[in-house]
Image (cartoon, grey):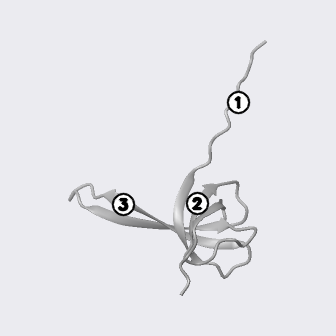
Amino acid sequence: METTTEHKKTPKLRTGIVVKDKMQKTVVVEVVRRVMHPKYGKFVRKRLRYAADNPDNQAKAGDMVLIEETRPLSKTKRWRVREVTQKAMTV
């Protein structure tokens, strides 16, 4: 009899800023990372935008959030808001 140990994968985590929150239960999060250019050695900013599930509508535009990868929830949503790490400054 063989014993199988199943390892549960840890989800990918990204930190970004919410740029759009007009949809219901969905926010668009922009993640910026710095990558060194292979030829010139200069650091270049690369950005990606992820549609993330926001079921309780807790994240608003300008908030810094932690998102985690999840199963496909819709055509574009593959990420879920795990927590709001920093609220946006309101004037």
Q: Is residue 45 left or right of residue 48?
A: left
Q: Which residue is mark 3?
A: 34
For disc 2, the marked residue is 66
Residue 75 position in % (x across, y down): 69, 66
x, y (%) of residue 81?
65, 62
Instruction: Name which of mark 1 and mark 2 comes first in the sequence.
Output: 1
Q: Is residue 5 above or below residue 29?
A: above
Give the residue furthest to the front.
91
Residue shown at the point (22%, 56%) measured from the top left:
39
Up-down relation of residue 8 to residue 16 (above or below): above
Q: Nearer the viewer, mark 3 or mark 2?
A: 2
**Residue farthest bottom in this picture:** 91
Q: Residue at x 34, y 58 (%)?
A: 35
Q: Is residue 75 visible?
A: yes
Instruction: Categorize mark 3 by other alpha carbons within 10 Å: few (<14), some (14-19), many (20+).
Output: few
Residue 5 falls in which quadrant of the image?
Answer: top right
Q: Nearer the viewer, mark 1 or mark 2?
A: 2
Going by the numbered disc 1, the residue's amino acid type is Glu
Q: Determine the residue positioned at 62% across, 48% down.
A: 11
Q: CA distance from mark 1 to mark 3?
A: 35 Å
Q: Report whether residue 76 is seen.
A: no
